[in-house]
Image (cartoon, helix red, strand yellow):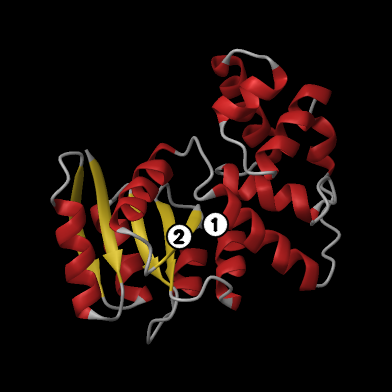
Amino acid sequence: MIEVLVADDQEMVREGFSALLDAQPDISVVGSAGDGAAAVALVRSLRPDVVLMDIRMPEMDGLAATRLLADDPVKVLVLTTFDLDDYVYEALRAGASGFLLKHAPARELLDAVRVVARGDALLAPSVTKRLIEDFVKVQPARAVKPARLGALTDRETEVLRLIATGLSNTEIAAHLVLAEQTVKTHVSRVLMKLEVRDRAQAVIAAYESGLVVPG
């Protein structure tokens, strides 16, 4: 059972998302919050697997809340009205596992929660990749190029490049003519060596290090 916390300052939105998610046999909504501070407190007391985090909230916004939860095991799924919201890229850098537009179809929301909970696939690959590319283009160079990038083997570096293009494990396996389980092992080693929590963070590291060039 995937336990979810819904954080949004609009009560109608919270209730709508909660009803949709609770109707699923494999998802349970364990709580809801109207601002970032309440969301952080509830995450730490209820220990959900996933938190749906609205970006724009009073008192404490979703970006600040995501930063505070960066070291917690919960997966943060950012909710935004705008697909190029300035805060979304920063939220991904702060530790969010992915993002979803509020007007996305119900099926996409359900799939997103399951994908983020698994942590084994990048959420909405083409959209997330485009968003990261757009913001890396306009953000000042951060000269990330971590030394740990050099710890990757040639195969792991190749896998990271393919992750950054938005490919799933199945697609990477087909591209490299490898067993999917082998790809999963490579992905796990990439995340461990880069010291990142999931694929979204690995994609950001790939772009910010210059390993993958936007566009």
Q: Mark 1 or mark 2: which comes first in sequence?
A: 2
Q: Residue furthest bottom?
A: 58
Quarter of the image for the N terminus: give it: top left
Residue 175 in percent (x, y) is at 69, 24
Badge 2 local density, few (<14 within 10 Å), some, or many (20+)? many
Three-letter amino acid code at disc 1? Gly
- Element class at badge 1: loop
Mark 1 vs mark 2, CA separation in Å: 8 Å
**Amino acid type, callout 2:** Leu
| Apparent side of residue 28 relative to residue 202 in the rendered image (left or right) | left
* Along the line of sight, the residue nearer the viewer: 24 or 70: 24
Contact, CB < 8 Å: mark 1 with mark 2?
Answer: yes
Secondary element at tag 2: loop
Q: Residue tagged by mark 2?
A: 69
* 207 to the left or right of 124: right
Disc 1: CA contacts within 10 A as few (<14), some (14-19) or many (>=20) = many
Q: Residue at x 45, y 74 (%)?
A: 55
Examine the rendered structure and indicate whether residue 186 appears above or below residue 34: above
Position of residue 75 measured from the top left corner of the image (x, y, whole percent): 42, 50
Q: Position of residue 198 (x, y in %)?
A: 55, 43
In the foreground, 11 or 142: 11
Which of 105 and 5 lies nearest the eye of the viewer?
A: 105
Residue to which mark 1 is pinned: 95
Q: Residue at x 71, y 36 (%)?
A: 162
Where in the figure is residue 99, as x and y percent of width and height?
48, 60
Q: State which quadrant residue 211 falls in.
A: top right
Query: Label for residue 144?
Result: none
